[in-house]
Amino acid sequence: QVQLAESGGGLVQAGESLGLSCAASGTISSIYVMGWYRQAPEKARELVATISGGSTNYADSVKGRFTISKVANTVNLQMNSLKPEDTAVYYCYCNARSRSWDVNRNYWGQGTQVTVSS
């Protein structure tokens, strides 16, 4: 199995910055994609940003404000110019292959709360 340990999150005011980190551990053979999703109250979970190889992908709503990066098995999300609309539970995501499986599987962190006040 693969475990994702998230850190960061908290309460900030609009315009401020916050950084999230997620470390993958376990019997990992290969990591193909890592990223972040978020879910606001009573809304569906949505993609925030992903990184795969040298390629990154961002939701239109966060382009120019958020930056995703990855070193080894750790993915980071730097969130600048935060808006109240960014308030949500942020979930770390990983698509990886472990020694227990010969196919890629999706893994999720427990989620960390980000609250942006106006």
Image (cartoon, rainbow, N blue to C red):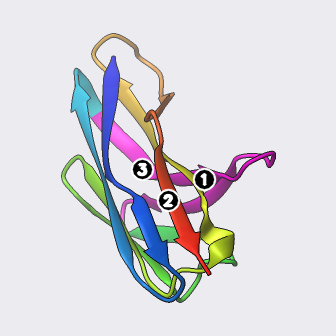
| Left or right of residue 3, residue 61 in this image | right
Q: Which residue is mark 2?
A: 114
Q: Nearer the viewer, residue 66 or 51?
A: 66
For residue 10, what is the image quadrant? bottom left
**Amino acid on which the number 1 mark rests in the picture:** Arg
Tags 3 and 1 in contact by the CB under 8 Å rule? no
Q: Nearer the viewer, residue 62 or 39?
A: 39
Q: Which residue is mark 1?
A: 38
Q: Residue 32: within the magenta?
A: yes
Image height of 41 relative to 115, above or below: above
Which residue is at 43% across, 58% downward? 52
Disc 1 element = strand
Q: Which residue is mark 3?
A: 34
Which residue is at 59% across, 83% downward? 63
Tags 2 and 1 in contact by the CB under 8 Å rule? yes
Q: Nearer the viewer, residue 104 or 69?
A: 69
Disc 2 element = strand
**Amino acid on which the number 2 mark rests in the picture:** Val
Please give the range of residues in magenta: 30-53
Residue 15 point in image, percent of width and height: 50, 89
Where is the C terminus found, in terms of image quarters?
A: bottom right
Residue 59 seen from this side: no
**Magenta stretch mostly in which secondary structure?**
strand
Spatial CA distance of label 3 from label 1 is 14 Å
Residue 14 point in image, percent of width and height: 54, 84
Decide which of tag 2 and tag 1 comes sooner along the chain. Answer: 1
